[in-house]
Image (cartoon, rainbow, N blue to C red):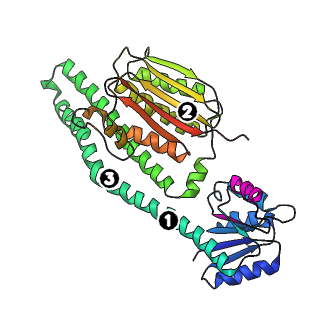
Amino acid sequence: MKKILIIDDEEWLRELVQLALRQKGLEVIEARDGSEGIETARKELPDLILCDINMGKVNGYLTLSALRNEAPTAAIPFILMTGLADNTTMRHGMELGADDFLPKPFTTDALYAAVDARLKKSQTTRDQAERNLAHLRDHINLTMPQEIRAPLNDILSNAERLANPAALKPSEIAGMGRKIDETGQRLERLIENFLTYAQLELVAADPKNISALRVGQTLHPARLIEKQAVARAAGSGRSGDVLFELADIPVPLVEEYLGKIVDELTRNAFKFSKPGTLVQVTLAETPNSVTLSVSDQGCGFSPEQSARISSYMPFDRKMREEQGLGLGLTIAKRLVELHGGTMVITSEEEIGSVVSARFPKARAD
């Protein structure tokens, strides 16, 4: 049963709305003012909130703002009720995150229409998330065993040969040890990326999780970006091939996720470009956005390959088997999108690529 919270300082209106919604089979809870409404929403986590604007002390705007700034309540659909539904009032409410307006006085039919529309939209979002999770489960069930088998077989075959060291030269033993270590690290990264991707899809399945994800930010990202990219360059044997142009401006995601995006974008750039060519990392701002870009002078992607990054699919599998799943860019793209941004790939085959993650500007606290 869906739970509706009504916040209004007029008892007679609360009673009328409550009676009407209960006739529709909805559970209704009440709050007499904004302060009580905020506490009730935190405790009950309703499926929808109906809130009057004009209340003493904590009005509807303050109530909405408070709930939107807390992760557990940030994604709850919120309808403002007001007798002054002019353009200024509605625009201010929408800027604070209101989902709809219900002008007073309203009829029972208008109340039902507003509530049904918000609940249906919320259900549609949940249904889409369930389909995405089903799609993820299918991919994991079909693909993960195959992807694990290749490096695991490599490790096992080398370990089997090492079980009889008397028949091997010291150089052969050392080579097999290095191969096991290298393949083991590749397998570890493969599993970590599977788990990361699955975790992100679970986050995407619930709007409340997305809202919680977007609370964090990195105030001074330049040092983190440079450190992560330098480490990736060293790990790729390309320490002298990285160039930076970084504006130290706030980015609307936590350091862990920013570092992951930088790692995946630079890893990709070094893999698909030749030693001695530059990989450039930039962070720049526009009036409404912050953009992290990584460019290389490598083999580039075809339009078809770029499009496939948006789904769980590797590309040029036979030619680039050593690159693994190709999940890295997909994970980076998912992280960008979950934080309200977009990732754009500009590429020409045999010329190079620019991968840009564009975010809305971090909020001013």
Q: Position of residue 339 (x, y in %)?
A: 55, 45
- Circle 2 sits on which residue? 291
Specify the quadrant that holds the N terminus.
bottom right
How busy is the neighbourhood of tag 1: few (under 14 within 10 Å), some, or many (20 plus)?
few
Residue shown at 78% from the left, 78% from the top: 13
Q: Position of residue 105 (x, y in %)?
A: 76, 75
Mark 3 or mark 1: which comes first in sequence?
1
How busy is the neighbourhood of tag 2: few (under 14 within 10 Å), some, or many (20 plus)?
many
CA separation in Å, label 1 and label 2? 31 Å
Residue 113 is left or right of residue 14, and the answer is left
Q: Secondary structure at mark 3?
A: helix
Q: Position of residue 298 (x, y in %)?
A: 35, 23
Q: Which of the 4 quarters of the picture holds residue 28?
A: bottom right
* Label ID, residue 124: 1
Q: Position of residue 268 (x, y in %)?
A: 39, 30
Residue type, label 2: Thr
Is residue 177 highlighted in magenta? Answer: no
